Image (cartoon, helix red, strand yellow):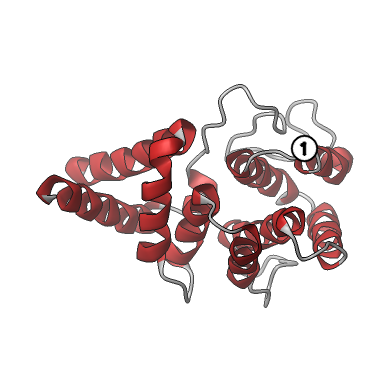
């Protein structure tokens, strides 16, 4: 019991440190194994780098999300999409608009939950990546509430709880401790989620030791 409490405290301390080190939805890639996502892109991407055509971003992102991708894959796909979209305000707006319309037109069931998760997570990721003074189509949107709605529609989903914890970590509201504890409990039966949580807390604690 003492070991579990120590581990939880270490993770929470690590999360707090990571919040100060950089935006968690952007700076921490999500491990997805061999699952398909958008082409890999790093934080230094600039329009014209490589061979990816930004005009295909909305189409390619929706193709992955509509293929019933797991939540972790959706998180990483939306993270990469945000890095790409940052280079083109029109593309950024188009992607968010399409995901919002998709959620509004979805049913209030487990499938619809994924649509609300997608637009909510993208909105919060946009907020963490778009700088001050830059056009941000997510300005004024409450992505956390949409992710919370997704969780209520989906039912028990540790991967969504992990996503909500990362949002609540730096957001104005939300209980990231509660979300993270639920994610941690569910990670016992989800090896990839456990890997991501261990990697996240391990990196943050390592950063603390260096400092």
**Is 71 on the left or on the right of 6, as rendered?**
right
Looking at the image, which is closer to me, 19 or 202?
A: 202
Helix or strand or loop: what does disc 1 sit on? Answer: helix
Q: Residue at (70%, 32%) from the top-left corner?
A: 37
Number of numbered callouts drawn: 1
Image coordinates of residue 197 in percent, x first then y, are: 39, 42
Which residue extends farthest left?
A: 2
Give the residue at mark 1: 64
- Please provide percent x and percent y for residue 54: 83, 40
| Vertical comparison of 90 with 50: above or below | below
Q: Residue at 22%, 47% (x, y): give it.
A: 208
Instruction: Compare residues 69 and 39 and report the one nearer the observer.
Output: 69
At 43% across and 37% down in the image, what residue appears?
189
The answer to whether 157 appears left or right of 49 in the picture is left
Image location of residue 30, percent across then percent down: 52, 38
Residue shown at 83% from the left, 38% from the top: 63
Question: How far across and how far down the image is residue 41, in percent?
Answer: 64, 33
Q: Splitting the image into 4 quarters, where does residue 60 fall?
A: top right
| Extreme-top residue of the structure | 34
Quarter location, residue 133: bottom right
Task: Count neighbours of disc 1 (C-alpha within 10 A) and say few if under 14, some if 14 to 19, many if 20 or more.
Answer: some
């Amino acid at each position: 019991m003492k070991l579990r409490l120590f581990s939880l405290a270490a993770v929470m301390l690590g999360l707090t440190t990571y919040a100060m080190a950089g935006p968690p939805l952007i700076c921490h890639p999500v491990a997805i194994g061999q699952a398909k996502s958008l082409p890999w892109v790093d934080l230094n991407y600039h329009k014209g780098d490589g061979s990816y055509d930004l005009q295909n971003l909305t189409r390619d992102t929706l193709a992955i999300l509509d293929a019933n991708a797991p939540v972790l894959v959706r998180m990483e796909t939306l993270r990469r999409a945000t890095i790409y979209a940052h280079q083109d305000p029109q593309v950024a707006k188009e992607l968010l608009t399409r995901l919002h319309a998709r959620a509004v037109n979805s049913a209030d069931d487990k499938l619809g939950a994924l649509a609300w998760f997608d637009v909510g997570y993208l909105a919060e990721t946009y907020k963490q990546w778009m700088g001050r003074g830059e056009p941000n189509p997510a300005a004024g949107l409450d992505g956390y509430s949409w992710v919370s709605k997704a969780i209520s529609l989906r039912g028990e989903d540790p991967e969504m709880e992990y996503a909500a914890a990362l949002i609540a970590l730096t957001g104005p509201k939300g209980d990231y401790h509660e979300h993270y504890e639920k994610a941690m409990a569910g990670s016992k039966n989800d090896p990839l989620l456990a890997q991501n949580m261990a990697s996240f807390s391990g990196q943050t604690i390592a950063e603390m030791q260096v400092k």
